[in-house]
Amino acid sequence: MSTSQVISSAHAGQKGGGRILRYTLSERVHHWLAALTYIYCLITGLAFWSPYMFWLADLVGGGPTARFWHPWFGVAFTLSMFWMYKMWHGDMQTTPADLAWKKAMVHYIRNEDEELPPIGRFNYGQKLFFWLMFYGVFLLVLSGFGLWFVESIAWSLRWLRYLAVTVHVAAALATIGGFMIHVYMGTAMVRGGFTSIIRGEVSTAWAKTHHRLWYEQVTGKIPPRK
Amino acid sequence: MSQATLQIVKISGHAGPVPGAGVERAEQVCKLVDTTTCIGCKACEVACLEWNGYTFTDTVFDNSYQTMPETAWNYWNLIKFNEHEREDGSVTLLMRKDQCMHCAEPGCLAACPADGAIVQYSNGIVDFQQEHCIGCGYCVSGCPFNIPKFNSGTKKMFKCTLCSDRVSEGLEPACIKSCPTGCLHFGTKDDMKDLAETRAKQLREHYGIEKAGVYDPPGVGGTGVIYVLHDVTNPEAYGGLPKDPHIPWVVRFWKGPAKWIGNFAMLFGVVGVTMHYLRYGPKQVDDRKNGNGAQP
């Protein structure tokens, strides 16, 4: 059973003032666990990345402290990503509606939302971001263990040390790109999005505008998509 | 270790130029290890422990005279033993004193992200400053000689200091002082190079060891430890001395172009979303059209 259906049966149409539950408490908690652990890894990781950003380590207790906690927060981020996967992977599959939306994505970027085909609970961009972070964390945690226990990699297998560095850097930069767009859209661009991931609710107007198929589904106007 | 009388010319993880670099020129110091006169007595191993204040740890037996397989965080000087079979089938014992090579272009320093954790002095010594070390282990990936070692208790990296504390006071390194056969020499790089070439020539012309030569690898800009080898064409036989060591290209790319590509990409991201906001602004939910007065 997908999360959309849970919301649909429990909350649709029951709240006054045209509010719809978009994220359950569990979803919000896991989102913020992921957000905080990722941001910690980002701050400390950037400190290790460039001497010009090494001062960032001072924000979180200095270089050795940052180095000690970075891998542990990375493991916590991986776990929270696993939970998000369990909650959302059903909702994150590409649908025919997404493909139509993808073709018209330029209108989304230009805020010409009336030109866009209706989409479900998450749009194609959100799904891309989800899978970027999902595969990103997979690569980050694998290569991260290589960096964490670098001396345990035998000298004769030292190409693995170099591979770990390469993969960690590439995956980190890719997730940073996604993260920037995600934060920008969640806070500045799509008004109401930030409130929804904190308090869980959106207005019916918001739901109709941004996720019409989901709105119709949770209000019972069309049957839930399998 | 001691920075008191040594001028720093290179600093790891440092934003901007090195303060005071170039104001003082010093002679490059160098250790010369003549493997042809080493008897494998390990006096240098003991002298290193004594001077640096480490106790003797457990040895690891691996069917050879070698104390342990690799140097350790508290065992910086290790003679590598190799029973080498010559082309004619006879066997010889190759012995090489292994320690930090003090590269002119140190891979550890290039890889290190911590400001001032690894320095290179104007006399060529590459030294770890444990008070600035964050214990990340990047130097392990940067080193082409497998030298930096991690102390999991203190979370700091350690290696041979070339006795920077002794050298800065005008003394020779402890290992050099202890050598009973005179196979270890210490002096300026130029003098040691001369001495090594003279010895190699002697081996070639007077002893008929045709492949004798000097190991001073140019891939890392030359080293502060040079070897006289019986067979300079096969340094790998001396306990895995790399034939053509250089800073791994991944590390050079990571610390060079990748950094600028990554930084410009991140800057581009910040500028990009800012420009998008200035050009297009936020998405408005048209409540009238949707027939509902609720605010998002």
Image (cartoon, grey):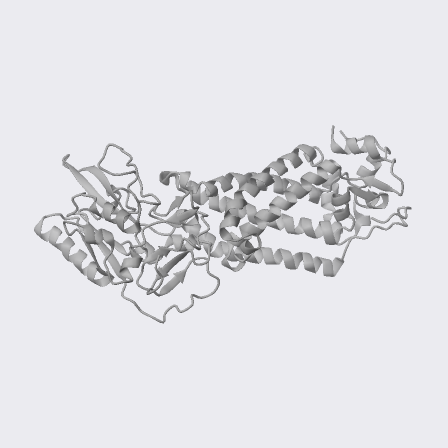
**Where, quadrant-wise, is the N terminus of chain A in this rendering?**
top right
Whether B260 is drawn above or below B152: the answer is: below
x 27%, y 62%: residue: B169
Q: Give the percent coordinates (x, y) of residue A203.
A: 84, 44
Query: Left or right: where does residue B139 sit relative to residue A196?
Result: left
Side (left or right) of A152 relative to B236? right
Which corner quadrant of the image does residue A9 belong to? Answer: top right
Residue A28 location (% of width, % of height): 72, 40
The residue lying at 73 percent from left, 51 percent from top is A187
Q: Residue at x 79, y 46 (%)?
A: A116
Say if A101 sits above or below B195 in the image: above
- Is residue B125 left or right of B211 when viewed as pictured? right
Q: Horizontal and vertical percent for residue B221? A: 32, 58
Of residue B44 and residue A218, the one placed in the foreground of this image is: B44
Q: Is residue A194 visible?
A: yes
Looking at the image, which residue sits at the far left? B206
Q: Who is closer to the viewer here, B246 or B131?
A: B131
Quadrant containing the C terminus of chain A in the rendered view = top right
Residue A106: in sight, yes or no?
no
Quadrant in the rendering for residue A134: top right
Foreground residue among B3 and B82: B3
Establish if B137 lies above or below B21: above
Residue B88, horizontal then vertical, whole percent? 14, 36
Is A84 on the left-hand or right-hand side of A56? right
